[in-house]
Image: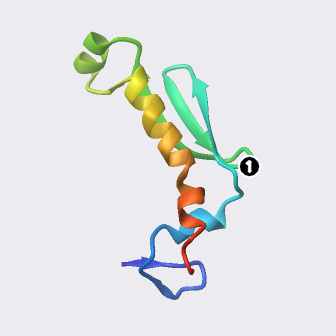
Amino acid sequence: MTFCASGARCTYGPCWAKETSSPWRADKIAGGYVVRDANGRALAYIYSRDNEADALQAKVLTKDEARRIAVNIARLPQLAAGSPC
């Protein structure tokens, strides 16, 4: 069950995405990516390794996998824009 900022029950998705400043962006950092809101607040860190062998050994994502996940997280406010919350 998800609750909106107002405390009301929300069944339409990630209403918390509306509580941060849009747009979100995925920035490359050493060792992965960070997703930031429009104010520069870090929302998520996605760690990775440069090649698949290192990623498997460290049990983390490859650089390409981390990039795709970071970009999709950065798109969440656009997806939540249609939510009635």
Left/right placement of residue 39 relative to residue 79 reads: right
Front-most of residues 84 and 73: 84
Q: How is the image coloured?
A: rainbow
Left/right placement of residue 6 relative to residue 3 reads: right
- Find the residue positioned furthest to the right: 39
Q: Which residue is mark 1?
A: 38
Q: Position of residue 65 (x, y in %)?
A: 38, 29
Q: Residue at x 59, y 57 (%)?
A: 78
Left/right placement of residue 61 relative to residue 17 reads: left
- Find the residue positioned furthest to the bottom: 8
Q: Is the C terminus in the top left, top right, bottom left or bottom right quadrant?
A: bottom right
Left/right placement of residue 44 relative to residue 61 reads: right
Q: Is 67 situated above or below 35?
A: above
Q: Is 6 situated above or below 73?
A: below
- Find the residue positioned furthest to the front: 82
State the SS at label 1: loop
Q: Position of residue 84 (x, y in %)?
A: 56, 80
Q: Looking at the image, how many numbered discs can be counted on the residues? A: 1
Q: Residue at x 59, y 78 (%)?
A: 5
Q: How many neighbours does mark 1 have within 10 angstroms: few (below 14), some (14-19), or many (20 or more)? A: few
Q: Position of residue 36 (x, y in %)?
A: 64, 44
Kind of residue at disc 1:
Ala
Q: Quadrant of residue 63?
A: top left
Q: Is 50 situated above or below 37?
A: above
Q: Is 45 situated above or below 30?
A: below
Q: Quadrant of residue 61?
A: top left
Q: Residue at x 59, y 25 (%)?
A: 28
Q: Is the N terminus in the top left, top right, bottom left or bottom right quadrant?
A: bottom left
Q: Residue at x 54, y 86 (%)?
A: 7
Q: Position of residue 55 (x, y in %)?
A: 30, 19
